[in-house]
Amino acid sequence: MQELNIIPGTLPPECEALRMEVREFVAKELGDFPLARRVRNWTGGDPDFSRKLAAKGWIGMTWPKDYGGHERSTLERYVVLEELLQAGAPVGMHWVADRQSGPLLMRYSPKVLAPRLVPAIARGELFFCIGMSEPDSGSDLASIRTKATRIGDEWSITGRKVWTSGAHNKHYMIALVRTSEGSQRQGGVSQLLVDMKTPGITVRPIVNQLGEHDFNEVTFDDVRVPAENLIGEEGEGWKQVGAELAYERAGPERYLSSTQLLKEMIDEANPQDPRQAVALGRVVAQYATLRQMSLGVATMLAQGLTPGLAASVVKDQGALVEQAMPDLAHDLFGGLAEPGSPLDLAMRYTAMAAPSFSLRGGTREILRGIIAKGLGLR
Amino acid sequence: MSDSMIEQSVARIFADNVDKAVLQAVEGGAFADRLWSLVTDSGFHVAVASEAQGGIGQTWGAAYPILRGLGYWQVPVPLAETMIGACLLSAAGIEIPEGPIALIEQGHDSTLTVQGIGGAQTISGRAKRVAWARHSPTAVVSLAGGALALVDLREPGTTHATARPNHARIPSDDLVFESARVLALADVSIAGLSLPVWTLGAMARSAMMVGALEWLLEQSVQYANDRVQFGRPIGKNQAIQQQLALMAGDVAAARVAATVAANDAASPAQLDASRTAFSAAVAKSRVGEAATRGTSIAHQVHGAIGFTHEHLLHFATRRVWTWREEFGADSWWAERLGRAAISARSEAFWPALTDRHYQGGLT
């Protein structure tokens, strides 16, 4: 159970100076950024904002300068992320590339793909999406069927991916595909870099229950990509994806998605109303704890530890707290918020978005299965 | 003492000297004299008192394993109370008396007035639910305004105690003072530490609850792996696994909240009190929630055997239910935190999280 022990972290002084710099930037750039867009948080994107962040050196912060990075510490990056997320900044365009695609390329294709693409990611010009889930492969990712066949010095990809966020407005996908004929489960899968402009790709929108277009179904019909687009070793895709999911689960975005609704509730509440004070005080305690847990995981990562279980715990706990926000808003202010008011807007948006919080990046049930194994349940 | 030295001696003393017989004897009204001697011989009771007053001069962060250990091994002695009393007395420059020290916060579960001037003050009024009072020769009373009074509980005719039952069956008394003698009176010289007894008490109870919850989680996992039904261990069922995973998440959150509260708690070795109240409030609220859900899951996993007196489970769950109430229940601390958050408005929400402090404190 030692793996579940999250050691609270302490930020070095340079992080606090950077925090003030980010707060100034956010105040200047997002002073009149409308709530309707803030509530979307990291699922909302703006290429111009991404480029402004890049100009500050806040994309690819920890990457080597050779790849266009800035060689800052992982804790400095953490501070920038948490400050942007709590403000509801539109970081969605570069989020995936900064979080996982860039690191993946530098690690597994350091000489071929990374030098070509990573500097553009760091400039905030190149955006990525993730091709993992398929129509018959959701939580059971090892059952994917999209296949890639080697033909000369190319791969030919045929199959279908779903729930692909941003396939319609990102430049590249990193797709998990089956590269070995007749292979089963975790064996024989690989990761391929796919330019989304390649012929044979069809992107069909899947409108979500908010009425928004974020998800897509992506069909590959003999899509040809160069052999050098293989990321890492052929057949090692499962292991690589595992490392990628660890990045995906560990970050502060896992507890800072409903923050705008909480802020609206705080502004609407009356400090002399004990029912509201108790309810919101509990939430402040939950967020304060989650922040310490998330910072603890970041600190452990910075020390070279691999707190995979702890990250799963933070994501599970984060989703619980975040999903409770619309229900709490209903409990305290349901039917009372002025139609069209900021509280009303935040309530309606977050209530509709909340079910996704325990689905994306690993469902609650999958995460708890991982935690249970970590506890020693056999 | 280094952290690991404290941890090692905590484990050695508590693991070997707390068993069902001691727990039952204390719940039956006895005082665990031998256990208390072992604890005081090790210096745990003055771990956070200043060296100037004969203490060890540790921070609450360094002493966290002691508090956590009180919960993990369900140690039935007034150690947390005495540690807090000795810490505050030493901060006020008052000599630390022999024996257990009971704790009272004026105006919180108590209505008290101090009479007299100079060296001849007395205290009168009532205090409710004072843990271990009947076994404590003295009490530390934190007075509104920042002063600290050391009160004699043993002077004949001046203190009347009535037992107040609780889930844990740990001694707790309602006290009536009739001109009880104040042995010493001085200001706690830690700037900005408001409600010191309740704040440090909430921090300590949070750490103790975390210890008990960690023990409950370990016991529940063990039981789920051992208990066979339908031809396999019940822990193979996803329904059980999901419950225990949820409990593990709650315990992990509670541990972080309690650890941060201990790290932020002021003492003679750490005079910065700016984060003490915020982090104690966060911990008591968050750990209280984990206690509510965690005890329920531990009992559910254990089934009927965990509902028997014979089984040890209830010694931990009953303590958690009592500690959840003491020094302000989770809802009491949540209300203070919520009032501060609402009064400071949304723009202060995030800075308060990163600073662990609300301008103007908690009211």
Image (cartoon, coloured by chain):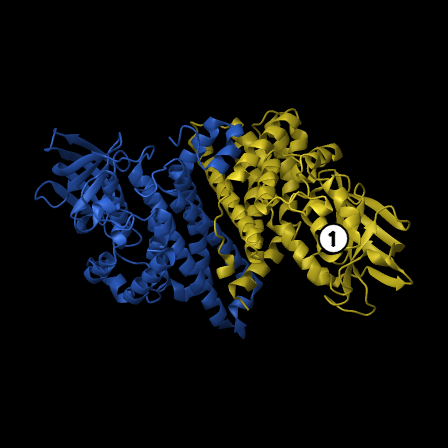
Chain colours: A yellow, B blue
Q: Position of residue B348 (x, y in %)?
A: 50, 30
Q: Chain of mark 1?
A: A
Q: Residues within 10 Å of mark 1 (few under 14, many from 20)?
A: many
Q: Quadrant of residue B336?
A: top left
Residue B172: x and y, percent? 24, 48
Q: Nearer the viewer, residue B26 or B59?
A: B59
Residue B296 located left or right of residue B149: right
Regarding residue A163, the answer to whether it shows in the image is no
Residue A95 image point, x, y percent: 69, 43
Give the residue at mark 1: A105
Q: Residue at x 12, y 36 (%)?
A: B178
Q: Position of residue A324 (x, y in %)?
A: 55, 42
Question: Does B66 sit above or below residue B157?
Answer: below
| Amino acid type, residue under disc 1 in the picture | Leu
Residue at x-position 30% and y-position 67% = B16
Q: Does the rendering let one see residue A23?
A: yes
Occupied quadrant, residue A327: top right
Left/right of residue A118 with respect to residue B131 in the rendered view: right
**Quarter-of-image position of residue A53:** top right
